Image (spheres, helix red, strand yellow):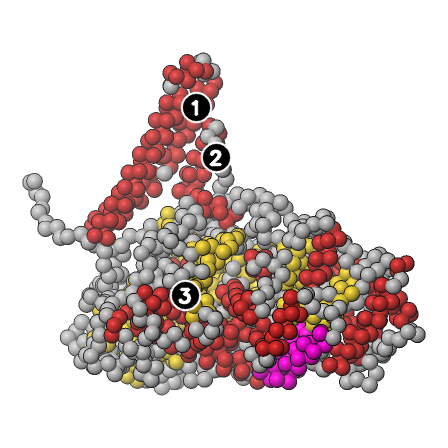
Amino acid sequence: GPGGRCEALGRVPFGMKLKKQVTVCGAAIFCVAVFSLYLMLDRVQHDPTRHQSGGNFPRSQISVLQNRIEQLEQLLEENHEIISHIKDSVLELTAHAEGQPALPQHPLNGSWVLPAESRPSFLSVSPQDCQFALGGKGQSPDLQGSIPGHLWGPGSTLSGVSQPCLLPTDAGWWCLETFDKYYYDQTQHILNSMLLKMQEDPRRRFIWSEISFFSKWWDNISAQKRAAVRRLVGNGQLEMVTGGWVMPDEANSHYFAMIDQLIEGHQWLEKNIGVTPRSGWAVDPFGYSSTMPYLLKRSNLTAMLIQRVHYSIKKHFAATQNLEFMWRQTWDPDSSTDILCHMMPFYSYDVPHTCGPDPKICCQFDFKRLPGGRINCPWKVPPRAITDANVAERAQLLLDQYRKKSKLYRSKVLLVPLGDDFRYDKPQEWDAQFLNYQRIFDFLNSRPDLHVQAQFGTLSDYFDALYKKVGIVPGMRPPGFPVLTGDFFSYADREDHYWTGYFTSRPFYKSLDRVLESHLRGAEILYSLALAHARRAGADGRYPLSDYALLTNARRNLGLFQHHDAIAGTAKEAVAVDYGVRLLHSLTNLKRVIINAAHYLVLGDKDTYHHNPAAPFLGMDETRSSQDSLPEKTVIKLDTSPRFLVVFNPLEQERLSVVPVLVDTPHVRVLSEEGQPLPSQLSAVWNSATDVVPDVYQVSVLVRLPALGLRVLQLHKSLDGHAAPRASTRLYLHGRDAPVRKPEAVPLHIFPAAADDFCLENQHLQACFLGRTGLLQVTGEQQVHRVSSDFLVYGTRTSKDKSGAYLFLPDGEAKPYTPRDPPVVRVMEGPLFSEVSSYYQHVQTVVRLYNVPGVEGLSLDVSCLVDIRDHINKELALRFSTDIESDDTFFTDLNGFQIQARRYQRKLPLQANFYPMPAMAYIQDVQSRLTLLTAQALGVSSLRSGQLEVILDRRLMQDDNRGLGQGLKDNKRTCNRFRLLLERRSTANKSSGFFSKLVSMFKALGFPGTRTGSPEVQDERPISFPSLLSHITSVHLNAEALVMPVALENPALPALRSFVPLATTLPCDFHILNLRTLQAEDDSLPSAEAALILHRKGFDCSLEAKNLGFNCTTSQGKVGSGAGPAVLWRAWAGGARLAEAAAATF
C-alpha cells in the first residue's frame, strides 16, 4: 500500500513454527474457554428448560447469578495482563527466529548493552502447583519447633512394669583413626567375635548399622561364614539397623548424598544378605534433621531411635512422657510421613547412661569394667560378677533403675541399649556381658512376683513388643503418643555448650564434598545415557563398562564422608587428610567417567568410537595438585586450527550460562557447532591483587545448553579483528606502593588512591559498592533495598571452656574485622558480566553481576577466598545487613531438602542461635525476601532484624573436651561460593489469584469437584518454601556446566554433534536427583537397569519469578515418559514429592 514497505520473508524453522502455533492455539483456547464460561453462566440465568423443570427462579437467585457474572467480567479485566503477555510473546516469536544469544553492543557512552533475548521465555505456574506445597490443613501436631526446657531430678521415685530389651552394639567413632585402620585394628575383630559368640546361644542378640565396615569384612570372610551370617539375620539374632553406608551427619549433609549412601547400603544388603532394614538407629549425630525420618519412612522403615538432643528438651520430654512420638514433616497435611521415634532420655548412649537415671548404679552393670580390666567406673563403685549368692540383690538394684526409666515412657516395654564406642572387639567382653546379664534375666524371669520379663533383643524386637503391647500394627500411631514436627538443632549437652561450631569446621572439605557430589550426579546421568545408547547400537563391547567400578567407588567414598565425624569436620588431622585423598581420588575418576561418556555421545558416527585410557579424547576442565589445593583450570592452547569444546549441562532444564575457558591468546573468538559467533568476553587472569598471569586469558562465552545435554563449541584464533570483546579493568591501590604487572592485551587503568562509591547494574539489578572497601552497600531492582556486607571476627572465651571443632563458645558479640592494610579494589566491566574484587589480608571477595538474560542475571554471585592460617582462636564471619523488617524470624534449609523456620531467642546465649545452612537461608517481610544461597554447608544466624550472618572459617588452638584431642589448626585456603537473591512479593499474584477466585466462584455456584484456597493460605504451622527462582538458582550454583576440550593430539578429528537427550522439557518444579545405573551380579559391572529419582519441589508462589531465561511451566506433578520405568515409591518431600523409579530397562 501507499507508504508501505515490501520485505522478503525467509523460512521459519519448524520448531519456530511449532512454538508459534502452540502459543497462538493456547491463547485461542484460553479465550474460547473464558467466553464459553460466560455463555454458560448466561444460559444458567436464561435457560427456559430450567424454568419448565424447576419453575421460575426467585428474583434473589437471579440477582446472585448476575453478581457472579459481573465478578467474572471484573476478573477477566484483571486478567488482561496475561492475555497481553501471550500477545507480546506471539509477536516476539513472529519477529525473531530461534538461534544463538544476541551479540553484545558497545554504544558510545561506554556502557555495555546486551540486546533483548530473541527467544522469549514463559512462566506458567498452575494454581494447583501453588497449592501443592501447602497441602491441606491436616492434623495439627502436638509439638513443634524448639521445646523449652524443664528440670527433673535423677532421684525421682518411679515404679511400673517393664520389659527390658538389651541391645549390644558398637557405635564406631571414626574421628581418631582412618577408616582402614579402624577396620584392621578393631572392627574386623568385633565382627569375627560376633559371628563366634552369637552362635553359642540363640537367645543372644546384636545390631549393626554401618554397611561400609560390614561390607569390607564380608569381602574377607569365607562362604561358610557368610552363610552363618545369613542364618543369624534370618533367625532374628543379628539385625541390620538403618542400613546406610554410614551413620550420617544430619546438619551438613545434602539430601543427594544422604539418599545415595542409603541406597548404597540397602542395595548391598539386598544383594548379599537378602534383607531390608526395618528400624533406624542414630545415636551419635550432633542434632537431628527432620529430613532423615522422611527418608527412612519412604525406605519402608517403621521406627527409629535418636540420642543427641538438647538436654533441656530431653528433660521436658521425659517429664511429660513424650520421649516416644510420631515424627511428622512440617508440610505434611495428614499423617503420611509419620514415623515412630524413640528418644533416649539420658546424657549418653554408653552403659552407665542407659539402664536408668543413676549412672553410678548403671556403671556397675557394665561388665567390661570388672576389676582387673583396662577401664573402670569413674564413680568408684566397680561392677561385680553375678553369682548365685548375689544375683537377687544385684537384680533388684538393676530392676529399680529399669522401673525408674520406664516411668519416663508411656508404654510398659523398656529399651536398654548395652554398648559403647570401641566395644565387643574381644571374646572376653562378649562372655562377660552376655553371661552375667543372662544370670540376671534368668532370676528376674523366674520370679512372677516381680512382674517383669527380661531378654536380649534387637531394636526391631523392642518396637515389635511395643506395638504388640498397645495392640496396633507396626507403623501406626500408638494411642496417646504425641505428634511432633520440626528438627532437633541446635544441640547442647550441658550448660551453654552448644555444638554449633561444627556447622562450619573445616569448610574446605565441606566444599570439596559438594564438588564431588555434583560430579557424581553428572557422571551417573551421563554414564547411564551413554550406556543405554551403546547397548542400543550394539557397541557396549567397545564402551568402557569398567567405568562402573569407578562410579561405585565414588558412591562409597562420598557416602563415607557423610559420616558424622567426617563432613562435620570433627576428625583428627591425619583422618581429615585420608578423607581428602579419598574425595580427590574419586573426583578425578568421575571426571574420567564423564569424559568417556561425553566422547561417545558427541560422536556423529558412533562406529568410530575407540576408548584409549592412555590418551583420552577429551581433556579435564580443571585439576587439583593435591587433596588440600584449590582447582586450577586447564589452559587451552590455540593455533591456526580450531579447537573444539564439549560443554555438559548436568541440569534437567535448558540453561543460558556464561561458561569460562582459559586460553593462551587474546585473539580468540567462539563459534557454535554450526559456525555462528557467540557472545563472549575476554578478561585477564590474576595471580593476586596486582599480579596478572602472563599469556593466559579468560574467554567467557554465553551459550544455551540443552537439558542433560552436551553442546559442541569451537575456539578459533582470530587475527582479523573479530576477537571477543575485551573487558576493561580499574585497579584502586588505596595508597599502597605495590608493583603492578599489567596485562598486555586487556585495558587496565591504575588509580593510586581509593575509588569513590560506584555502582554496577544490569536490566534487573543495581549493586553499589563502597569505594574505600569494595564491599557491597546497596542492591535492588527499581525500588532500592539497602543491603550492605561486612566482615566480622569472633574470639573465644578466656575461661577453661573454649571453642573447638564441635563447640562454638564466643567471647561475646563479633567485632569488626580490621585488616592491617586497606584493600586493593579491582573493578572489571565487560559485556557479559562485571565484577568487583577486594583483596584483604585474610579474605578476597569477588562480587559478580551478570549482564545476561535468564537466571544468571537475577542474583549476585559472591565468592570469598578465605585464608586465616595466621589467626589464633578466631572465627571469620560475613554479615549482610538490610532494611528488611524480619524481626526475630529467619529461615534455614535442612539438607537442601526443606525449609525450617527459626527464631532468634534472646534468652539463650548467642551461640545457641546458629543453625546449619547446607543450601540456603533467608529473611523476609511482607514486601521482600533476601536469600543467601550457598555451595557449601556453613553455620548461619540472624542476630538482629534484617541481618544474615554466616561463619566462613574457624581456627582454634585447643580441644573442646569432646573426645577429639585436637584443635582446628589445619586450615586451608578455602573458596566459599554464594548467590545473593533479592526478591519482591507480588502485591497480587494475578494469574494464581485469578484462577483461585474462579475456582471459588465455581464452588459458590455449586459446581462439584472444586477446591478453594489461595497460595498464601496456610495453617498455624511455621511452613515456608523457597521461590521457584531460588530453587533454580541453587541448582545453577551447585551444578556448574563442565567444559571438556577435545585433546590437541587428534590430527583427524571425527565429526562431532551436540547431544540433546530430552525430547521435551521437564516441568521446572521437577528435579532429576539422580539416574543411577544399578549393579549387575558382579558388582563391578552395570546391569541393564537404572534407578530414576525425581524430586518435585514445593515453592512459594507469592514471590515474583520473571525472566528465568527458559520456558518454565508446571504440570501438577505429571511427567510424560512414554513407556517409562515403574514408580516404586512416591511421597511428599519438603512440600515436594520425591519419587524413585527403578527397573528401567534400557
- The residue beneath circle 2 is 1009
Residue under the point 35% across and 65% down: 532
Residue under the point 43% across and 47% down: 1116
Decide which of tag 2 and tag 1 comes sooner along the chain.
Answer: 1
Task: Name the foreground residue: 152 vs 1048.
Answer: 1048
Task: Name the foreground residue: 211 vs 75.
Answer: 211
- The residue beneath circle 1 is 65
Decide which of tag 3 and tag 1 comes sooner along the chain.
Answer: 1
Q: What residue type is labelled 1?
A: Leu
Tell whether label 1 touches label 3 (CB within 8 Å).
no
Name the mark nearer the viewer: 2 or 1.
Answer: 2
Q: What residue type is labelled 3?
A: Ala
Residue under the point 43% across and 63% down: 1090
Q: Which amino acid does label 2 sit on?
A: Gly
Is residue 578 rendered to the left or right of residue 476?
left
- The residue beneath circle 3 is 1088
Residue stretch in magenta: 170-199
Residue under the point 33% across and 84% down: 614
Q: Where is residue 363 in the image (x, y as percent from the top left)?
A: 81, 74
The overriding secondary structure of the stretch rendered in magenta is: helix
Quadrant for residue 172, please give it: bottom right
> In the rendered image of this protein, does residue 1108 appear above or below residue 606?
above
CA neighbours of label 3 inside 10 A, class few (<14), some (14 to 19), many (20+): some
Whether residue 810 is visible to the viewer of this picture, yes or no, is no
CA neighbours of label 1 inside 10 A, class few (<14), some (14 to 19), many (20+): some
Q: Position of residue 177 (x, y in %)?
A: 61, 83
Task: Name the foreground residue: 1006 vs 526.
Answer: 526
